[in-house]
Image: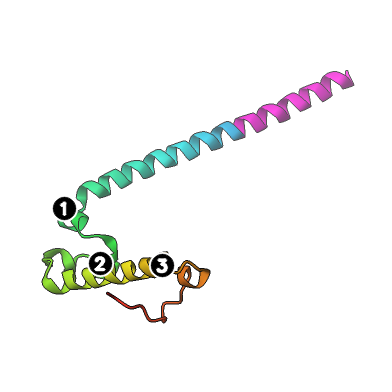
Amino acid sequence: METALVVLAVGVLFGGMVLMLTMGFLNAERERTLQAQAQEAAAVRRPAAMITIPGFFSRPERAMESLNVVFDDELVNRIEHHVRLEQAVVAQFVHHPSVDNLYRESGAPVHVH
């Protein structure tokens, strides 16, 4: 009689744990599905102009103000200057490979050729 009671208790305990795990898994999958649907809906509502501007050029708090911004010469010049600085850093590392050239501080001077 005691053995049957222990087996019944272990069965109920095991069944309860399996039930809790299953319900937790289903709840997590339901939340994941709802999040995916919300992201798809947000992507549809996002203006096309916002998608064409890379994120590092616009600030999140000024995102709606920058919808009417057209790429101008100043922006092109900033991008070109940034690319030239990056090329100078790479060229410096290629010609003189060292850890100092690879991990230079942002305040270190870089010569643009």
* Mark 1: few/some/many CA within 10 Å (<14, 14-19, 20+): few
Quadrant of the snapshot with the N terminus:
top right
Three-letter residue code for mark 1: Ala
Circle 1 residue? 48
Place residue 70 in its image quadrant. Answer: bottom left
Does the stretch in magenta take in 2? Answer: yes
| Left or right: 80 in relation to 72 | right
Choose mark 1 or mark 3, whichever is in front. Answer: 3
Choose mark 2 or mark 3, whichever is in front. Answer: 3
Circle 3 residue? 95
The percent coordinates of residue 3 (x first, y second) are 87, 20
Q: Nearer the viewer, residue 9 or 78?
A: 78
The answer to whether the residue labelled 1 contacts the one labelled 2, judged by CB atoms less than 8 Å apart, is: no
Give whichever of discs 2 and 3 has the lower sequence position: 2
Residue at the (27%, 70%) spot, across then down: 84
Three-letter residue code for mark 2: Phe
Give whichever of discs 1 and 3 has the lower sequence position: 1
The percent coordinates of residue 81 (x first, y second) are 24, 73
* Mark 2: few/some/many CA within 10 Å (<14, 14-19, 20+): few
| Left or right: 30 in relation to 20 | left
Choose mark 1 or mark 2, whichever is in front. Answer: 2
Residue at the (21%, 54%) spot, across then down: 51
SS under mark 1: helix
Residue segment shown in magenta: 1-20
Q: Give the Cα distance between marks 2 and 3.
A: 31 Å
Q: Give the Cα distance between marks 1 and 3.
A: 43 Å
Residue at the (61%, 30%) spot, across then down: 19
Residue at the (57%, 31%) spot, across then down: 22
